[in-house]
Amino acid sequence: MDLLHRVLFTAFGTLTLFYVVVKISLGYWKRRGILHEKPKFLWGNIKGVVGGKRHVLDALQTIYDTHKGQAPFVGCYALLKPFVMVLDLELVHNILVSDEGYFTSRGLYNNVSNEPLSGNLLQLDGHKWRSLHAKSVTVFTSSNLHKLMPRLLQVSNIFGSRIGEQKLQQLNVSQLVDSYNIEVIGLLGFGLTGDQVEFRKMSRSYWNNFSLWRAYLALELPLLARLVQYTSYDELATNYFYNLVHAQLYQQRLRDRQPLQNFLQLFSAVDDALSDAQIAAQAFGFILAGLEPLNATLSFCLYELALQPDLQDRVRSEIQQLLHQHDGQLTADSLKQLKYTKQVLNETLRLHTPYPFLLRRATKEFELAKSVFVIARGNNLIIPVAAIHRDPSIYPDPLRFDPDRFEAAAVKARPAMSFLPFGQGLRGCIAMQLAEQQLLIGLVALLQHHKYAPCAETQIPLQYDNRKLLLMPKTDIQLSVEYVDT
Ligand code: HEM
């Protein structure tokens, strides 16, 4: 056989093999006889998502809207990977809460030996996650959050005064809230006081070498990815965070018996101590899991309030009244009185759900009660939270921003599992209480003395960034801001 024939033969063989692998992968649900969304060759059901033409929320919502009510779950594919999309809220409850022991894995890639910061709670599974989770719940307690509250208020007070007293100015609200959240994370998560220029830079650059394709391959073939030492994050940034935590822990240990000031102290004090590398991974978790959802929530919230000034005035007067009653001082208890402000935050999290879906992996076969359906061991599950939050049978006129949906009676009337911005159960957001506190205190600082309104640069209607899996604005949110003396 001459060279040309050999090349043609090899190319043909490779293409045939590729075709067969794709066909077999995309035939998974058909072979199991399960209702599924028909996949497109190679793309599965996320055509357009990988190239940034549409947001993953849109792809998931299409599947949810098409099949809801037909079965407890429907099969679908992210490229070649089969997923169970859960449609029924009772099944959501089983998976997240009542039968969570079957679904304690999330199935994300991690490689702790080569990339120690990937050993955070979000990415770990199995016994490593279990042991770390048991220790971490002793850190994120209400009593610790109470003790750290003065530090949080310290940042928010300085932040509020920094917005300025100009009569009218145009502000990049996305950058404004980012500076607040980074400062809080720097102080509480990493014990950083003073200059945070480098920290800010690194917090923005750790995704620098991210490629969706490579991340997908690492998810599909984790053993191979570990073999070739695939890393998810920018090396410069992760080295910076790692070394920063080591230096901070060293300094803290020299100052023995100091009052509680940050989470590094709490993580170092847990029984059956964590190693410094494990503590560094948990501190990194603040940035990885927390920064972007906090930024998105605060900026979406201001955007919605700018469009509806009457709601904004109502929030501002609630805040001013509370501060007046408590001599301008906030406490964890007094924050609970900000009922309407909390409703506004919840409505923001419903309409612009930062994590539009939750992931689980079945670690054991799960038989659905009173049905013939089985979720097989190793199946990946997706809970389409944002689609549930926009389901008109649960939230009528779902695209309207209406905080009254979160009045106590309305919440009680809705089914369980219909509001899941922080997930739920064992693998739910471990920092939910901290995040809610940070958001509420941030809103107090932002709204106490300032009014927000759309300006020429405000993008209306708002668009999401299709290249992100989280729900983020496509471009920075800009608003006009006016100082109001009270
Ligand atoms: C608006 C802010 C936030 C939102 C909306 C949010 C939402 C979420 C969601 C949806 C999950 C997955 C839950 C599940 O699978 O059931 C999660 C997990 C997690 N979040 Fe948050 N989060 C926020 C802020 C934070 C912050 C500030 C931290 C800082 C430490 C944090 C740390 C984590 C961690 C470590 C996990 C993984 C927990 C585990 O798997 O055991 N989050 N978060």
Image: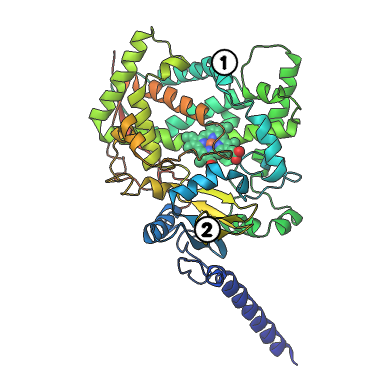
Q: Is residue 292 visible?
A: no
Residue at 42% from the left image edge and 25% from the top image edge? 440
Q: Position of residue 388 (x, y in %)?
A: 40, 48
Q: Secondary structure at mark 2?
A: strand
Q: Position of residue 111 (x, y in %)?
A: 71, 47
Q: On the image, which quarter does residue 430 sit in?
A: top right
Q: From the image, tell me which residue sits under label 1.
A: 147
Vertically, is 286 above or below 17? above
Residue at 44% from the left image edge and 22% from the top image edge? 441
Residue at 44% from the left image edge and 33% from the top image edge? 175
> Which amino acid type is marked by label 2?
Val
Q: Rate crowding at label 1 as few (under 14), some (14 to 19) or many (20 or more) other CA atoms within 10 Å.
A: some
Q: Is mark 1 within 8 Å of ligand 1?
A: no
| Of residues 152 and 102, the one drawn nearer to the viewer in this rendering | 102
Q: Secondary structure at mark 1?
A: helix
The number of numbered badges drawn on the structure is: 2
Coloring scheme of the render? rainbow
Q: From the image, tell me which residue sits under label 2.
A: 84
